[in-house]
Image (cartoon, helix red, strand yellow):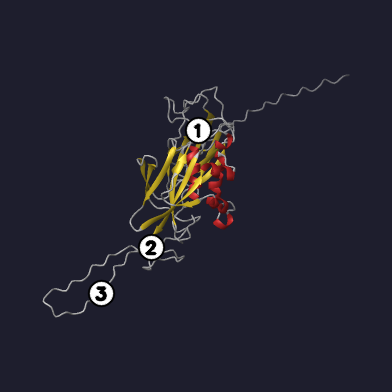
Amino acid sequence: MKEEPVKEEPVKEEPVKEEPKPETEPVKEEPVKATTGIINGIIWFDENEDGIRQEKETRISDVPVYLLNKNYDVVEEVYTKDGLYTFKDIKPGTYYIEVYGMDIGYYYTSPQHEGTDPTIDSDLDEDDLAKVKLQAGDIVQVDAGLYGLEDEEMDMANLLIVTNFLDANNDQIPGYTEQTIPATYTITDAITGKDVYTEEVGKDDALSIELTPGTYTVKTEVAAGYTVEAMHHVSLDEMMDSFELTKAGAEALAVGMADEDEEEFPGYDEFLKLFKRKATTDSVTLTDETMGYFLLAEIKKAKPVVEPKPTPQPTKTSTQPVQTPVTEVKAENPDTSTSNSNASGERLPQAGEEKPFPYAATGAGLAVVGLWLLLRRAG
C-alpha cells in the first residue's frame, strides 16, 4: 500500500511592523561670507571704432591687462585668452584696470561708455584706465575695445617735448635719478619773435606739444633760488634710430630704466651721449619730415647773495653828517664744484631722495617716459 503524503499546514507569517523613525531636521549650512572680489572683462577689436562690441567683432588674445592699486602700482598682470581675462581673490579697495595692446598692434582705445548697454561698451577713459571701487563679494566687469593695425606707421611730426633736471652734483649731465622741479616753458617763434605757447608744468612732468613747421626757442622759468644754466637737445629721430625703438620698445626701455639701477642699466650711458648741451637761447627747427626734439633744461640751485658789510669810515670832526658810500651788490656765479652743499651750508637735494616718476626714474629718465607716454596717445 502506498502511504498518503502528509499534508503540511501552511505557516502563517505575521507581518513585522516597523516602528516609524523620527524625522531629523536637515543641517543648515551657514553661508560663507565673501572677503574678496573679482574683476573680469572682455577685450575686443573694435573694427568700426564706435566703442560698442558687436557679435561680428573678434576678441583679442595675448593682450596684457594690469591691475593697479590706488597709487598706480602694478598689483597683478594677466593676458587675455580669447579676449577674456580675470583677476580673482582681490581684496576690497580702489583699483585701476589698464589695458596695453601696442605690442600686438592695437594702438588706440575705443571711446568710453558709448550706447545704453554697459555689458557691451568700452570702459577705459582717455588715459587707458578704468577706476574700480571693489567691495567684498563684488564681480565687476571692465571691458575694452582696441583698434589699430600691426603695421601702422607712427604718424608724428613737429613734436616738442620739454622737461628739466636739477643738477645736484653740478656735473652738467642729466643724472639717472636727478629730480625735476616745477617750471614754466614759453615757446617763441625765432623768426617773428612772438610767443606761440606757454605752459606751467609740475614736478616730474613734461611739456609735450605738436607745432607747425618752423624754428623755435624755449624759455624756462623756475622759482626764485634756481637758475637755468643750459638746454640739452636730442632729436627724436636720432633717439628712435639709435635704440631702434618701436612704440612698444619705447615702453620697454622706460620700464627697464625703472627696474634697474644706473650701474646695471647698460643703455643709459648711450642714451646720455645723444644729448647735446647748448645755450638756453639756441633754437630747434621742426619739419614735417622729422619727429621733433626733446629738450632737457639744466637747473642749478643758485648760491644766496651775501650782503657785504659796510666799510667803517674814519671819524671826522665835522658838522656835516657822515655819508656811507653805496656799494652795488652783484649776484655771484653759481657754484661749479662737486660738493653736495652750497656756500651757506644748505644741503642740496640728492638723487633718489624722493619717489621717482611712475614707470621710470626722474631727470633724464623722464625723457624716455615722456616719449613713451606721447607715443601711447599718438594719433
Q: Which residue is mark 1?
A: 108
Q: Is residue 222 visible?
A: yes
| Mark closer to the chain start, 1 or 2 | 1
Instruction: Tell me the quarter of the image containing the N terminus.
Output: top right
Disc 3 designates what residue? 311
Tell me where residue 90 appears, x and y as whole percent.
49, 43
Label 3 neighbourhood size at 10 Å, few (<14), some (14-19), many (20+)?
few
Q: Residue furthest right?
A: 1
* Residue 202 numbered tag: none
Q: Foreground residue, 261 or 113?
A: 261
Q: Is residue 167 above or below residue 78?
A: below
Q: Looking at this view, name the residue that lies furthest to the left.
A: 319
**Horizontal and vertical percent for residue 254?**
53, 47
The amino acid at mark 2 is Asn
> Where does label 2 land, which residue?
333
How many marks can you see?
3
Query: In the structure shown, which secondary structural element does the residue marked by tag 2 occupy?
Result: loop
Asked whether disc 3 touches disc 2, contact meaning CB atoms under 8 Å apart, the reply is no
Image position, residue 12 (x, y; %): 67, 26
Label 1: state its secondary structure. Answer: strand
Image point (56%, 42%), residue name: 240
Image position of 246 (left or right of 164): right
